Image (spheres, rainbow, N blue to C red):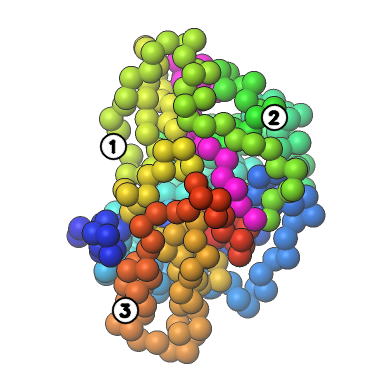
Amino acid sequence: MTGISDSFLRPINYLRVSVTDRCNLRCVYCMPEEGVPWMARSNILTYEELSSIIRASVELGISKIRITGGEPLVRTGIADFIKMIDQIPGVEEIAMTTNGILLSRYAADIKKAGLRRVNVSMDTLKPEKFKKICRGVDSGGDIARVIEGIQAAREAGLNPVKINMVVMAGINDDEILDFASKTLDEEWHVRFIELMPFTGHDGSTPTGLTTRELKQRIDPLGHMVPFKHQWGNGPAKYYKLPGARGTIGFISALSEHFCFNCNRIRLTADGKLRPCLMSENMIDLREPLRGGMAAEQLKELIQKAVSAKPKGHLLGEGHKPNDRPFCQVGG
Ligand code: SAM
Ligand code: SF4
């Protein structure tokens, strides 16, 4: 399968599926401290409904699925859901993005169910700062649990485990070198993410750093060389420091945007297909699905969403999506 193409002839083969808007953390760049009103449970798609949409997408040419949220591991039965989608003919790869708090509990089960890889979000290596950035909530914001989760994921054979760090000036930018150094002696795959403006987080959200600034900060560790990898075909550009065992990736949504290569669409937990993360435009699949829509018509709607992908986002021109917080989009 080669994937469906959008109106700009970009092949679309990647679906990000948000299984919940709920989360056990409240990261400063993602949600306000008091949280956001959760979606009504009846509005959230069942695993069977999610599977029907995934099946229809795969029949159109989607082959890679990433499970995200909110926090995907807080939804009960996630390993069974992974097993369900692993059995859909044409699904070549299932991956997950998680905050890692519950990962040590589930790593072995989700691997056994068919998950191939995991990205773990961790913005600091310091316990107190971790609590400040993600504001623990029900999990207590214990970084030790994330570290244990990363370890458990490696032991379970989820490979590679990538670490996502959103870099914020004056908050965690003093740790850029610590994270980059982790790739030298250990097989850490660190990805520095440019902070994106999104509705729903605190008004006090700090500013991000550009990839250019990040590279300058890492320069004292040596000259990075581009690294060709086999992992998916996402937006990150990868490099290696001299002699490093791990890699350093940059996701530069703002400063070097990658829209011309975009290969993805997103399904929200309440059943909206979102052609672009940074545009409010969405096509509802839940009501047609619950109304008994046939698979062929469902495919037509998915195709319509793919055709509606804009050429690029308009963040540079000051437009940011204002409809939903990140956790309700499936970032
Ligand atoms: N809860 C899971 C997690 O944190 O990994 C999955 C959902 S989270 C919305 C997905 C990714 O989006 C995380 O890596 C997170 O750091 C990133 N993210 C959230 N808000 C962001 C923002 N404003 N700018 C850049 N990345 C953001
Ligand atoms: Fe939760 Fe992930 Fe958002 Fe943090 S980034 S609040 S962990 S959904």
Figure check: 226 above or below 121:
above
Q: Which residue is mark 3?
A: 300
Q: Which residue is mark 1?
A: 230
Callout 1: CB less than 8 Å from ligand 1? no
Name the amino acid type tagged 1: Gln
Residue 326 percent across, percent down from the top left: 59, 55
Name the amino acid type tagged 3: Glu
Residue 19 percent across, percent down from the top left: 54, 62
Q: Residue at x 57, y 40 (%)?
A: 195
Nearer the camera: disc 2 or disc 1 = 2
> Within 10 angstroms of label 3, few (less than 14), some, or many (20 or more) residues?
some
Residue situated furthest left in the rendering? 1
Residue situated furthest bottom in the rendering? 291
Mark sitting on residue 266: none
Callout 2: CB less than 8 Å from ligand 1? no
Query: Magenta includes 63?
Result: no
Magenta stretch bounds? 179-199
Q: Residue at x 47, y 26 (%)?
A: 212
Query: In the image shown, does 200 or 249 lie closer to the viewer?
Result: 200
Mark sitting on residue 171: 2
> Within 10 angstroms of label 1, few (less than 14), some, or many (20 or more) residues?
few
Inter-mark Cα distance, 3 to 2: 46 Å
Query: In the image shown, does 194 or 92 lie closer to the viewer?
Result: 194
Name the amino acid type tagged 2: Ile
Left or right of 162: which side holds 178? right
Kindly indicate whether the residue at mark 1 contacts the one at mark 2 (C-beta within 8 angstroms). no
Tell me which label, 2 or 1, sits earlier in the chain: 2
- Secondary structure under the numbered disc 3 in the rendered image: helix
Query: In the image shown, does 251 or 108 lie closer to the viewer?
Result: 251
Tell me which label, 1 or 3, sits earlier in the chain: 1
Left or right of 44: which side holds 204? right
